[in-house]
């Protein structure tokens, strides 16, 4: 009963402000204010205020809201873990297969060996020698970078 009275008073005050605004020849703003001020009385007439008051003071309603919040937290945590892992198992398996198919050639990441190599044509550049398996030359790229910088 008290909520309905307050909502009706708010609605009447809003309509009064809309009338003053229309008197000042600001009809668009007056129409908008009138629309906002009719919402509280509409809520009273539909019974939404009584429902909201009953819900606010109902322990079972709050238990239901708590369960919905808990379900939402569980759902969001599983989504976060799934994103951190890189998707579902099926998506990860597809990504691994795609990465294996598109493997980068070993010579594609070889550093340039000197200041003149950028201006040379492809024919004048020395070709990279293929490495023998287990040759023990694992640090050749690092040595080339250090030599390039004079270290």
Image: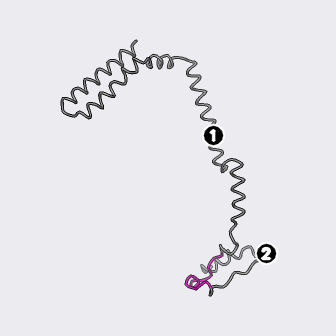
Work out whether 45 lies above or below 144. Answer: above
x, y (%) of residue 33? 29, 29
Secondary structure, mark 1, is: helix
Q: Is residue 54 above or below residue 132?
A: above
Q: Secondary structure at mark 2?
A: loop
**Residue found 32% across the figure and 21% down from its top:** 11
All told, the count of numbered labels is 2
Cβ atoms at labels 2 and 1 below 8 Å apart: no
Q: Residue furthest bottom?
A: 124
Q: Quadrant of the N terminus?
A: top left
**On the image, numbered disc 1 is attached to which residue?**
77
The residue to which callout 2 is attached is: 136
Residue beneath the point at 32% across and 25% down = 37
Q: Position of residue 44 (x, y in %)?
A: 40, 18
- Indicate the position of residue 84 as horizontal and vertical percent values: 64, 48
Res 42 quadrant in image: top left
Against 88, is 131 above or below?
below
* Disc nearest the viewer among 2 and 1: 1
Q: Is residue 29 left or right of residue 87?
A: left
- Crowdedness near tag 2: few (<14), some (14–19) or many (≥20) residues, C-alpha within 10 Å: few
Q: Which residues are magenta?
A: 110-122
Q: Residue lying at the far right in this picture: please name it.
A: 134
């Amino acid at each position: 009963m008290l909520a309905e009275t307050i909502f009706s008073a708010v609605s009447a005050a809003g309509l009064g402000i809309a009338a003053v605004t229309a008197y000042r020849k600001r009809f668009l703003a007056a129409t908008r204010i009138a629309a906002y001020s009719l919402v509280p009385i509409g809520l009273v007439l539909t019974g939404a205020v009584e429902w909201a008051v009953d819900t606010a003071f109902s322990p079972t309603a709050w238990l239901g809201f708590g369960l919905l919040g808990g379900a939402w937290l569980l759902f969001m945590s599983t989504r976060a873990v799934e994103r951190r892992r890189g998707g579902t198992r099926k998506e990860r398996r597809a990504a691994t297969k795609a990465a294996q198919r598109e493997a980068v050639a070993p010579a594609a990441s070889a550093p340039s060996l000197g200041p003149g190599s950028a201006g040379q044509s492809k024919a004048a550049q020395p070709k990279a020698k293929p490495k023998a398996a287990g040759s023990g030359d694992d640090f050749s790229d690092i040595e080339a970078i250090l030599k390039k910088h004079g270290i």
